[in-house]
Image (tube, rainbow, N blue to C red):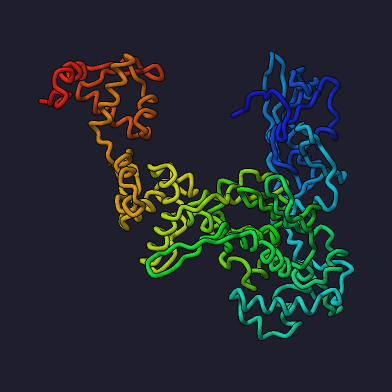
Amino acid sequence: MIPALPSAESLTVEFKSDRKRLPDSDLVEAIVCLANAEGGTLWLGVEDDSTPTGLHVEHRNLAGLAGLVAARTSPSLRVQVEPVEAAGLPVACITVSKAQTVVATVGGVYLRRRLKHDGTPECAPMLPHERESRAASLGLVDVSAQPVAGATLADLDPLERERLRQAVQQYGGDRVLLELDDEALDGALGLTARQPDGSRVPTLTGLLLVGRETSLRQWVPTHEFAFQVLAQQAVRFNEFRRFPLLKALDWLETNFRPYNPEDEIQVGLFRVPVPLVDMAAFREAVANALIHRDYHRLGAVHVRLEDDVLVVSNPGGLVDGVTLANLLVTEPRPRNRALADAMKRVGVVERSGRGVDTIFRGMLKFGRPSPDYSRTDVHSVVVRLPTTPADVDFRRLVVQEERRRGAELPIDSLIALAAIRELKRVTAEELAERIQRDAASAKRTLEALTEAGLVEAHGTTRGRSYTLSLTVYRAAGDKAGYTRQAGFTALQHEQMVLSYVRQHGQIKRAEVMELCRLSEGQTKDLLKRMQGDSLLQLEGAGRGAFYRMGERGVNGWKRMETDERHPFPQKE
């Protein structure tokens, strides 16, 4: 389907005038520019202000345009060219897919599309380090496995290598590493790369893990991190460092602990800590930022504690294939694979590659909101961990259930309980969006929690919804809350709808959903039942459809005025 002519240029939309016949070289460069960003559409025969002025006579025959682009790009780009009529003039819509490698013109011109500070797009040259960064984000190269030109074994610090061995013991890493000598250890973790002459040269992974601080400043100038504490617009702590990563993690954790107060709750015979920020989530978020940042970009990894949130950010956006919509379920795609693998073997980060689960778990198990990645863009990954007060009753519930099972709750179950706690009532479709899976998977999760006695189901088939169980509400001392959520019977919903119609003369489906706090499926079932019982009468069709009082509905209100004990006549 050919898209409509946009009203303005953007990161994925380019307009090119063809009144004076756009040179083929300019056209190819504009297409390369789009392909090296997010792809998009190029409209040939349209001015920069989106005014169509038509194709030059030499471009009216579009049959060979795709072949021209393929012949003048390396590697060859495939584009789709469609003729379009805009304001009575012929223009061309050229659809360009996002390239899965770095593309240039055959003349060796590398360009990429980007947004300027004012939000308008431009084509800019791709410098060598930007081409490497692009290739790394696409998973084509692993810069962390490459030797660092100019570095020598003297740049590796024996004290940091000893710290690495201690970290293996501290974090429960691969104990085989403890049996290796220095050269074998370097080879096993990819800290060095052997050259054709037999010598060994430090890799980026080697310098980042066990390099000297002075060597990191010289050979990896993009490596830097900061810890900041901001309280009511006052700066209480603000330090920048360039330590190797294991020392960096120790330093950050040591300096963060004084700002991470901890309470305790009693669960049975045990006392359970309730910190401001879960340390496992803190360690995973910080380690992810240091490991997966783009080391081609200048800029520091920031760990910033504000009044009500902990913010961890790193230069370099999400790698290709990872989005905010699949963050919980996509396969791990590390930008710096060798560095990530080394840190996993040391035991610093999650061995399964599901570190995001650890961050979510560290927030949700205390009844706090989910981690917020919404400020992530193509330039940086930003995760915000709210430090709102913990829900002690919810934490106690999670601890008791995990002790009963003898294992941690699955992350999907934890997300489901948190969602029901927040929204009071959810459907499988609503949960599916939160766990980033299909509705069938969400339903299995909810039914498993129902069998465990933590959740209760209401309704059947498509209208089925779920609330926390009476046991959970009772444990929290909120029995009235359970009644408010589960106690609305179908008759009560009918009364609410009929009362609305009596007051306003009519009601629409959307108004029923809002009035009764029902899902679309539940609303359809309620209205169908009330129509079948002659309580309501449907009038109109489509979006204009609405319901008036039916025959039994009218009689019901008349009778209620004389006998409140029986507001509606029984159906014969």
The residue closer to the viewer here, 19 or 287, is 287
Task: Give the side of residue 435 with respect to residue 498, left or right.
Answer: right
User: Is the N terminus in the top left, top right, bottom left or bottom right quadrant?
Assistant: top right
Q: Is residue 453 visible?
A: yes
* Percent of width and height locating residue 253: 66, 65
Q: For the image shown, how many numbered marks are present on the structure?
A: 0
Which residue appears at 74% of the width and 59% of the height? 141
Relative image position of residue 167 (x, y in whole percent):
66, 75
Residue 556, placed above or below residue 35: above
Indicate whether 171 appears above or below 470.
Answer: below
Q: Residue at x 18, y 17 (%)?
A: 561
Going 55% across and 49% down the picture, which residue do you hit? Answer: 388
Residue 46 in the figure: left or right of residue 365: right
In the visual, does 398 lie left or right of 459? right
Q: Quadrant of the C terminus?
A: top left
Q: Is residue 286 above or below residue 306?
A: below
Q: Residue furthest left?
A: 572
Question: In the image, residue 357 lies at what x, y percent?
Answer: 53, 58
Q: Nearer the viewer, residue 115 or 488?
A: 488
Q: Nearer the viewer, residue 522 or 139?
A: 522
Q: Which picture quadrant has residue 490?
A: top left
Which of the 4 quarters of the picture holds residue 4? top right
Image spot of residue 383 (x, y percent): 63, 50
User: Is there any visible trace of residue 337 in the rendered image?
Assistant: no
Q: Residue at x 69, y 13 (%)?
A: 88
For residue 409, side relative to residue 179 (left or right): left
